[in-house]
Amino acid sequence: MGRSPCCDKMGLKKGPWTSEEDQKLLAYIEEHGHGSWRSLPEKAGLHRCGKSCRLRWTNYLRPDIKRGKFNLQEEQTIIQLHALLGNRWSAIATHLPKRTDNEIKNYWNTHLKKRLVKMGIDPVTHKPKNETPLSSSLGGLSKNAATLSHMAQWESARLEAEARLARESKLLLYQTKVSSSSSSHHHLNITSSSSGKQNTTLHVQRWMETFFDFFVYKQNNADHQQQHQLESPTSTVSFSEAKTEFVGSSSASTCLNMIKEAENDWISSTIHEFQGVEEGLTGLLLGGGDSLGRSFSADKNETAGETSGDCNNGYYEEDNKNYLDSIFSFVDPSPSDSTPLF
DNA sequence: AACTCCTGCAACCGCACTTTG
DNA sequence: CCAAAGTGCGGTTGCAGGAGT
């Protein structure tokens, strides 16, 4: 459908914020909270649209924002998550405390993406731009790249589920609190909650079934060799078990917590595992005076090799190999390590 | 010193999704 | 159920400041 931007109203200021405006916005939010963003500017005495205020607050004024340079671990995390998630900045930002999606996006576009390009790696796919020579030298790379793509799809669906679960959990928690004030047990009585509200149990169940459909789709489409790679390396709960338990259980909150814990465990462990292969990757991408440091420091003198795109530079080739090995050693764990997520 | 080019980042834009009445 | 309002998100733009000539 689309909406006309709220800033279309004439007379509203655009562009950089002054310190006076910042103060007004800060003072208002500290005292009243932001409430409705649309009505905030008028109440706060700002000649801005609500959207502009929200952006200024979330990307700059919020007290829990860490500003300044990204450290090595943050850079690593961004690269690793981008390999899995692509340009899903908000999803990436959830795993980088105190950093905003906008800041991460900018940092990627201005720093990290360029590093990958200079290494001859496509920053979108995280594959070598000129795959033929490298893939032949690395062996089986295409297959691994396909696996990475599968993982990205899988993780994409997982993140959607995670976001949805977070919302549902909030609602469930709230409703549990309300109902528990008059009841000693926490079995959710969602269906009898306030009129007009959707039945949350059915809502979550619908999500589970959607997720299940996705899983079945994957099972039907992935070849058998790769199936184990679609599954979480760390989870101990099978999807069918979880689904059965969820549908059969009268305690939706227990099941939700179980699933959410599995989700969070997996995300944490993937990052941890990814960081476990930082040898090579760290030195490689962050230029700590190792091979890539040499490559980067000599960037300006090596544009010929770059523009030719042949990646014949020994450093580049070695670096690419290390980088891709690092990613794929994470993506392609040994079968014995793999247990189904659901 | 003056000019141009490049880089980094804050902010904007528009679409999509969710919530609300 | 529907339309409007509210919000989130990713892509893009414009400007300030630094580097190079």
Image (cartoon, coloured by chain):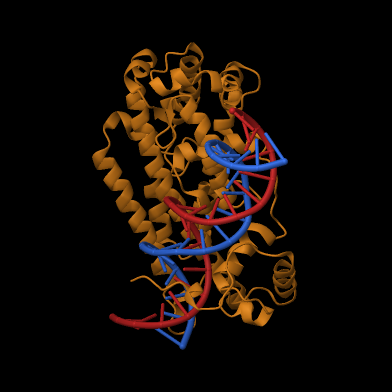
Chain colours: A orange, B blue, C red
- Seen from the viewer's position, the closer of residues A321 and A250 is A321
Residue A164 in percent (x, y) is at: 47, 60
The image quadrant that residue A62 belongs to is bottom right
Q: Is residue A246 above or below residue A221?
A: below
Q: Is residue B19 above or below residue A93?
A: below
**In this view, which residue lies farthest toward the left?**
A220
Q: How many marks?
A: 0
Residue A38 in percent (x, y) is at: 56, 77
Residue at point 68%, 41% (across, down): A69
The image quadrant that residue A282 belongs to is top right
- Seen from the viewer's position, the closer of residues A205 and A159 is A159
Q: Taking A169 as reference, is A223 left or right?
A: left
Does residue A269 appear in the picture of this structure?
Answer: no
Q: Quadrant of the N terminus of chain A?
A: bottom left
Residue A78 in percent (x, y) is at: 55, 39
Does residue A87 appear in the picture of this structure?
Answer: yes
- Seen from the viewer's position, the closer of residues A93 and C18 is C18
Residue at point 35%, 23% (across, down): A130
Residue C2 in percent (x, y) is at: 30, 81
